[in-house]
Amino acid sequence: MPILLTNSDVRELISPETAVEVMRETYRGLAAGTAVTRTRSQTFAETSRPGTFVELRTMDGIVPDFGSVGMRILPDLHQWPRIGGNQRYDKVPKKNGKFLAFDLIFDLDTADLQAVVQDAYLQKLRIAGTHGVAAEYLARSDASRVGLIGSGWLAEGVLMGLGAVRALESVKVFSPTPANRDRFARNARENLHLDAAAVDTPVAATRDVDVIVVCTNTIDPVFFGEWLAPAVHLDAISGRDIDEACFTRADYTVLSMREGRCNEGLNFAPSVLREALAPRFAPFEKDIPWDRYAELGEVITGQARSRENDREITFFCNNVGFGAQFAALGGKALALARERGLGKEFSIDDWYEDER
């Protein structure tokens, strides 16, 4: 019988270190041609609430190393508020004040549904694993000081991944909302045992650090290439909140996947909405020669190089999310749950049909 895995189950089953291992093998499989994936698609429509849009995001992948076929499904409501002078891309909770997102994990050999996994913590681990692997190959071996622009759920995931591959000592965090940056710094001190400080400007967060992380909900640049200094590793969670100069200023740039271009965009929307929505998606249309840059999987397999020296400015742009990440992590969580007796079984016998 399939099982339901909650966020609490996933947190118990998969550590940041395990997430790094899983993402390393996922990218390796993609580069070697044994795994396959689809990048995210976004389908938009206008709701009855002015300024609020419904968006259905899906992505899927197959990773034989973890025996899993996975699909991520996110039915979200979105708004584009301006906060602190920047355009944001914010999710809106459902009527009950909560969000709905889940991952379906199927068996590779039988195609039977094996698990439904709550998405929030799996997403956090996907971020931790991906950015941990990138830092493993691109950040200096002695990198210990992090500067962070952004203080949300996924920013904490990046920090967890960095801590899985480097002996971190300190973090400086900026958010335009003082309460948010203070909360993040406090949690980093208490949960990650780092010397953590909230700072008043994004520039202050990026000075005298070894790794710069840009992880925000804005779709306007909040980090600029002119701020990069020799020896630093820049880590951007989407590529939409940095300027194009980051690509020219960095000595070596690696992408998550060239096919993704710049993360999210206006994939599918009614024609009557496209003109109205287009300005909001302009930041996704960066004039970047994407095909020029290596992919993370190619670095892992040796098809592309890693960091060459301690003076180099390296840049990992997590320019797109894709389904294989969730298939692999979901498959790993499922295997561990079966071993440890976690997860709530449920029947789908009535779902099966005689014809197809």
Image: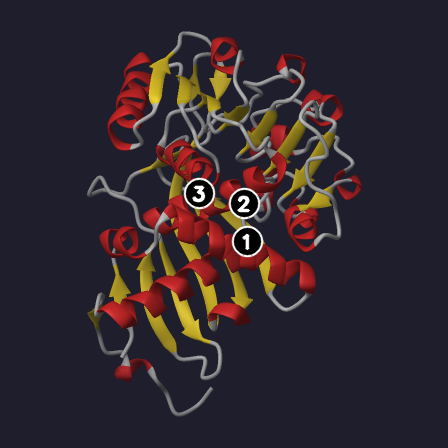
Label 2 belongs to which residue? 133
Q: Residue at x 51, y 53 (%)?
A: 23
> Could you tell which of marks 3 and 1 lies nearer the N-terminus?
1
Name the residue nearer the viewer: 54 or 100. 100
Label 3 belongs to which residue? 128
Q: Residue at x 56, y 22 (%)?
A: 220
Disc 3 marks a residue whose amino acid type is Ala
Label 1 belongs to which residue? 24
The answer to whether residue 166 is above or below residue 256 is above
Residue 266 found in image quarter: top right
**Quadrant where the N terminus is found in the figure:** bottom left
> Residue 34, percent across and down?
64, 69
Disc 2 marks a residue whose amino acid type is Val
**Inter-mark Cα distance, 1 to 2:** 6 Å
The answer to whether residue 47 is above or below residue 246 is below
> Residue 76, percent across and down?
38, 45
* Position of residue 233 in the picture relative to residue 308 (left or right): left
**Inter-mark Cα distance, 3 to 2:** 9 Å
> Could you tell which of marks 1 and 2 lies nearer the N-terminus?
1
Q: Which mark is residue 200?
A: none
**Nearest to viewer (mark 3 / mark 2):** 2
Circle 2: element type: helix
Q: Are marks 3 and 1 in contact (CB under 8 Å)?
A: no
Residue 181 found in image quarter: top left
Disc 1 marks a residue whose amino acid type is Arg
Circle 1: element type: helix
